Amino acid sequence: MPGNGVEPRSVRPPAELTSFVGRRQELKDIARLLDRCRLVTLAGPGGVGKTRLALRAAARFGATAGEDVAFADLAALREPGLLTRAVGEALGLPDQTPSCAPDALVHHLADRELLLVLDTCEHLVNACATLAEVLLQNAPRLRIIATSRQPLDVPGEHTLVVAPLPRPEPGARGPARTCDSMTLFAERAAAVVPGWALTDANRAAVALLCRRLDGIPLAIELAAVQLRALSVEQIVDRLDRRLPQMRGRRSGLRRHQTLRAAIDWSHELCSPGERLLWARLSVFAADVDLETAERVCADAGLPAERIFELIAGLVAKSVVLRVDREGTVRYRMLDIMREYGAERLAEAGETDAVQARAFELFSGVIVRAAGELRGPAQRSRLAWFRRERATIRDMVEYGLRRAPDDVLVAVALGLGRSYALRGLVGEARHWSLRVIESRAEGPGRAWTEILALAGMLAAMQDDLAPARDLLRRAERRALAEDDLGGLGYVRQVEGLAAFCAGDLDRATRRLEEARALHRRAGTEDVLVPLTDVFLAVTRTMAGDPEAAVRHADAVVRETEAAGEHWCRSYGLAARGLATLMGGDPAGALPDLRAGLRVKRDLDDRLGVALVLDMVGCCLAGTGDAVAGVRLLAAADRTRDRTGTSMFGPRHALLREHHERLARVTLGDDAFRAALDAGAKLDLETAIEEALDEHPRPTAPDPHDRARADGHASGGAPPGSPGGASGGAPGGASGPGAPGPAASVLTRRETEIAGLVAEGLTNRQIAELLVIAKRTVDSHLEHILAKLGFTSRAQVAAWFAQRPPERT
């Protein structure tokens, strides 16, 4: 299959929020270097603009060369062991075990033309260097732009030292000519003070200021903020009194001291409360919301009710940046500002206290969430884990160093469940093993559970030998402590491992035993209903679909009563699989599609892969062979990216049967074409096709060219939702069609475009349609891309002008 498979949208570089100034020669140099070599490192001190330059260079080169661009932001990553996983996420490989992650990256990149940006490498320089070298050696069409305060020192690396922006020459007479540093100041000043402009009256002062600041972009932006209270001349005067005399010193040191002086000055202009908050916010590796900042940064000397006022002041001074994520306002600091704050926090002797408060808050949420995941709060808790993932990683690292054993194990159990529910099996396993390997086993069920959990995660990744070892250790503990609930987990995972190994008899016995043990122990846990899910699948594969339906029904009833979604969606999928294996592929589709909708909204990538696979088999079984094969290929690519292989040999036989059926229906050439097309589907389109929300392609009948207008064999009949007639929004455009590409919108996209035209926000649309806001965001991105638009206003105008649909 081709290398470019189902990709999440996170591979795209972030949008630029402010104007890009200058750097014309550097952009030319980077393009020239990328034509000659495959690793270009943009090196330079903090605040000089390396990230912005890398983003602009990557966008230009990608557009010119026709290459995809992926962006990996490593600023918040602290553990080298997670580097390959973080880069994998940027490439659409969201979860792998540490041992196979490099191999997965190499396999994914082997035949791809891609430009990868590794941003902020200095704190992981050795790990970044090793990974870059491995990837470049094994992926001949890969190029890398890295940003770092020092070169990676990799063979073949070309280092471009990023200098400050050009600044006015000293001693120039008359009005200074505008240069890039002055342009940057002028643009940022106009954003701070509406109506401010560079004039003949202030040009000389601006030129002097940019010379004093050595053209360092961050220093210039910090100075521009001071225009709220000072004139340019006053800023220069105050700066002259601060900056040391640096003649005769090395330029690198001079620039460092200049930036340091600018940050010192910003710090002194802050109120005492703002300075304190600046320091305390430095404990967060990534962005943070207001409520978290209030709970971690406040104490008797800094009341929580003052945090908003102070954080607003820091935003106004460009110390803290405001970011919008998933419909919420959050705050973050540039690395160099965070480092400065961390120094101040250490000088005040507060580092341990603030880090302890942050760990206490996050660990408390994680532990509580483990219990809440089995009820109505599941969606909100999983959304919290998704938003806070970078900070959670940092907090667990702190816990590994400082937390008591019982707290650390409880955190690992909560984290493992939350990550497993999102299909992030590899990272869940990573943290479980880190805890197991870092501490001596203690008494109680928690240690039994974490050993069993790690064993389950290993089994899900088809790593059965380590799974068996972990389960033996867990079993010894459970038997020695007469722990029925702990033994229930062990038997449950043993049943899963037996199923993955193809031993259905052992799987059934162990799962039945686990079911009985959990009931006797009264275990309440989101993972317990999986016992019946596994039993349903095992019974299905053993040829007893009626028993399978009974187990699946039990899961659906229990989880519906509890208000739980994740296990319920697996129960629906298991019931659909039983119906499929019972000989009714059409009857299986409603359950499978209902389960897939939940999996999409929960962002459960493993679950999405599983259900896409089953829907593909159903479509192939109902004669819609092209659509079925496309989904089977898309499911394979999605499952590969989760790093799991939990289907077992019986599933392989099921797949082979439906693939043979589709190949016979289509013929070899059409079968391979459908397989290749499915491997290229983006994930959202694959899901839409599976849910019948997207027009599905059909294959022409070579024996009946008269039917080549879309009513092909195996396809949907004319006038049906998947057919070629009936006036569906995805049909071919005819005379008077509303502009190019308008006809490719899906029914859901057309519906959302109409709601945009009515003036609804994405969140309002999500609430109206009862779908996740993230799903609306994704649909709107598709709409903009398909119509060639850049704004909601254009979408609204287009929708208003389109002709009414014929009925």
Image: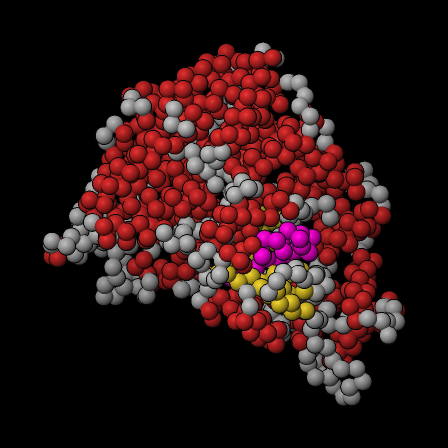
> In the rendered view, does 723 fall on the left or right side of 556?
left
Q: Which residues are magenta?
A: 115-133
Q: Position of residue 536 (x, y in %)?
A: 36, 24
Residue most extreme to the bottom:
174
State whether residue 320 appears in this view.
no
**What residue is at 32 percent from the left and 53 percent from the top?**
677
Considering the whole magenta stretch, tell me its main secondary structure. helix
Where in the figure is residue 180, as x and y percent of width and height? Answer: 67, 76
Residue shown at 73% from the left, 69% from the top: 216
Q: Is any atom of residue 195 visible in this view?
A: yes
| Quadrant of the rendered image containing residue 729 | bottom left
Residue 246 point in image, percent of width and height: 86, 71
Give the side of residue 589 with respect to residue 85, left or right.
Answer: left
Residue 742 figure quarter: bottom left
Q: Nearer the viewer, residue 209 or 684?
A: 684
In reply to whether residue 524 is colored magenta, the answer given is no
Please report the residue visible at 33 percent of the width from the left and 62 percent of the height from the top: 741
Residues 173 and 214: in front is 214
